């Protein structure tokens, strides 16, 4: 077990109807004026917006609104939000939505407490040393941003999707009511399941010595999510399955599943290039194609690890390690396909001549390689992209 | 999954040599004058005291010392510590030790920020509304107090051991170096393993609907600890096993293993009466006798639950649920015995005429019963104690 720091201070309020406590919770922290961010308006149709506003109003919280956060949130939106947050002197930022809205709020919170260009945070030109507090009402179980230290943003001018990690990115509180995800459609539900699994698998497949406790926790989470995902394809309003996926979303990315291990997110690097270049690709769907492709390429560099994954998560009984390893990757691929996820890059309707561009984006123009069981340089990354076209 | 609040804000610094960062960590929070509590002096023999003092001195931290915390820490000691903490106006309390020292610090921290008698907290006469921050350098993996919301104290005048839960009992930071537990003897190591398992099993065996994710996490933790405990009986300096047990200690009692479930600690109620009445009994050793006895009495009221426990944790393959349930309890009992734990109450050298007294203590003089799969009133509790004499 490698040394680690574990710090997951987000207070999670989990259960039915919890969104109606948002005003009381914020009042409890002493904040009186907040910025509310949300997406394209689905929370207005569902009635959630009205519930949130009623709760905030009843607690005497003044609200500055910034609706319209897009999926793969944009730095241009953040710049406007920062300007408004400063002008209005809001004391905290409330996200009502999924990972995109929460990440937009995290950038806004850091930007509002600094004089930097918020794009300087993911490009490492500036470090966050202060941020407004962020809270969220979660409506999508996927990104795990509600408890994570990470925040990802897209810069369309530069065709770049970048993230950074900081304890200032940890939400102060997260309100998680699984019922709020009943209306998430099958495709987005599946994308969420893949993203949650990916956050755990990324940490599971890193270059380090075995870690029995963390391994078993990760395997447990994967098994539970696999089962719950199956249930949700049949019955999207199964509370227990929605609850499992939602809580797993938080645990998958709050660092619990990586304690004592390296914490590289290798496949995410590839996917961020993909959905950064092609804005219509959902992050989870990109991962569903890339994770098996990555596994097929790298498994031979750590067969025992992939064999353990196959046996403990996918109940592969094959005695030969290499055969088991391969079977585990194929079971994973079949599972993603069974959720209705795309299987190959061409399923996204993209042309086959983008591989150089994607490899270039991943390596920041051949400036770096991505660490995995084999060093993933430009050529390796290009080969992985090509293998799943 | 029942509704829950999850809040585990303790920052954990885990790994070799981390105790030497204690001064820097405390300085980072801005505290300049602290109270240091520790036990009977083993940290002086081991050299840990000198390391801690060197680190604190190098960071310019002023230290007020209160050594001499006893196992099953005493309210009389806390009263003295509170007095001194107030006189000296210390800003935080640092525990160097195991659960007893940490719990003593928690009571001191709450007492120092209030005008109440600290015994009023566990007896519910007063509620903690403020407390000094507590940090710890952990030297014993057992109680999980380094991340838990609970604190237990003994009042020898009243022959009572009582606890209470509060978010003010959460440590601000915990420094966890598994190497510091190399010198813990076999008996205390075994007591720790049992206590850690008990914290998870208490939450696992509560009256509520199934919770797949939390169940699997709990089962994972139990399996890892069982394996690591075996290793430590052979090789007390196995870093990986010590690390597994230490991290499991924190996760077992920070509420992770109970999310979405009832959180009663039924067997702990019995054990607190036992080691409250007989001060020489180690908490973990008491649990090692009482947990199987409790299981044998109550399993018939929830056979599927005990069968799942048997199959997933103890790899029982018996197809019949009731037989599997019984086998699981016996495997657990055999495991505790294999660690050198006492098997019956008489092994503690106590007389057999104390059962009425113990049942009386558990039920606060027949004033309450303890909730479990069967309501545990005076008679049931007495029967359980008698069954394992």
Image (cartoon, coloured by chain):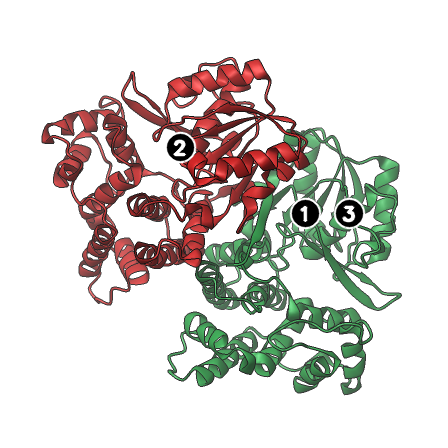
Chain colours: A green, B red
Label 1 vs label 3: CA separation? 9 Å
Kindly tell me whether residue A134 is visible in this rendering.
Answer: yes
Q: Quadrant of residue B150?
A: top left
SS assignment at label 3: loop
The chain under label 3 reads A
Could you tell me which secondary element the residue under label 1 belongs to?
Answer: helix
Point out residue A191 in the picture as x, y percentages from the top left corner.
62, 67
Name the spot of residue A268 as percent of width and height, x first. Answer: 67, 68
For marks 1 and 3, the one nearer the N-term is 3
Residue wearing tag 1 = A167
Q: Nearer the viewer, residue A229 or B160?
A: B160
Vertical order, A325 against B245 (above or below): below
Dot 2 corresponds to which residue? B100
Task: Indicate which label's residue lies in the foreground, 2 or 3.
Answer: 2
Q: Is residue A276 left or right of residue A76?
A: left
Residue A36 against residue A58 in the figure, above or below: below
Q: Dot 2 falls on which chain?
A: B
Q: Mark 3 sits on what residue?
A: A128
Image coordinates for residue B142, horizontal then vertical, percent: 38, 43
Question: What residue is at 50 percent from the left and 63 percent from the top?
Answer: A225
Front-lying residue, B368 or A310: A310
Q: Chain letter of disc 1?
A: A
Do discs 1 and 3 belong to a common subunit? yes
Q: CA distance from mark 2 to mark 3?
A: 39 Å
Determine contact: label 1, label 3, CB under 8 Å: no
How crowded is the residue under tag 3: few (<14 C-alpha within 10 Å), some, or many (20+)?
A: many
Image location of residue B182, percent across then percent down: 40, 49
Mark 1 Cα-neighbour bin, 10 Å: few <14, some 14–19, many ≥20: some
Name the element at disc 2. Answer: helix
- The answer to whether one can see residue B206 in this image is no
């Amino acid at each position: 077990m490698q040394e680690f720091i574990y710090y997951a201070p987000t207070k999670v309020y989990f259960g039915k109807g919890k969104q109606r406590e948002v005003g009381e919770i914020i009042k409890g922290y002493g904040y009186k004026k907040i910025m509310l961010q949300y997406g394209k308006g689905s929370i207005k149709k569902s009635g959630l917006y009205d519930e949130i506003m009623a709760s905030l109003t009843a607690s005497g919280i003044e609200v500055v609104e910034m609706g319209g956060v897009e999926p793969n949130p944009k730095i241009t939106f953040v710049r406007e939000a920062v300007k408004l947050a400063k002008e209005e002197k809001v004391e905290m930022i409330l996200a009502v939505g999924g990972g995109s809205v929460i990440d937009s709020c995290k950038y806004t919170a850091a930007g509002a407490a600094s004089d930097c260009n918020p794009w300087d945070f993911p490009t490492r030109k500036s470090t966050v040393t202060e941020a407004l507090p962020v809270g969220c009402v979660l409506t999508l179980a996927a990104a795990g941003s509600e408890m994570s230290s990470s925040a990802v943003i897209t810069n369309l001018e530069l065709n770049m999707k970048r993230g950074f990690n900081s304890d200032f990115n940890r939400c102060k509180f997260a309100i998680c009511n699984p019922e709020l995800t009943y209306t998430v459609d099958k495709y987005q539900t599946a994308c969420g399941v893949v993203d949650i699994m990916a956050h755990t698998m990324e940490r599971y497949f890193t270059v380090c010595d075995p870690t029995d406790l963390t391994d078993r926790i990760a395997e447990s989470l994967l098994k539970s999510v696999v089962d719950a995902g199956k249930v949700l394809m049949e019955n999207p309003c199964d509370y227990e399955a929605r609850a499992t996926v939602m809580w797993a979303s938080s645990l998958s990315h709050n660092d619990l599943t990586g304690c004592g291990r390296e914490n590289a997110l290798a496949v995410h690097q590839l996917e961020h290039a993909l959905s950064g270049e092609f804005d219509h690709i959902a992050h989870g769907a990109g991962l569903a194609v890339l994770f098996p492709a990555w596994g097929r390429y790298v498994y031979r560099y750590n067969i025992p690890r992939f064999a353990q994954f196959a046996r403990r998560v996918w109940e592969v009984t094959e005695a030969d390690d290499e055969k088991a390893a391969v079977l585990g990757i194929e079971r994973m691929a079949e599972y993603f396909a069974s959720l209705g996820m795309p299987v190959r890059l061409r399923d996204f309707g993209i042309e086959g001549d983008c591989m150089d561009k994607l490899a270039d984006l991943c390596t920041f123009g051949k400036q770096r390689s991505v660490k995995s069981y084999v060093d993933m340089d430009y050529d390796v990354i290009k080969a992985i992209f090509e293998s799943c076209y």
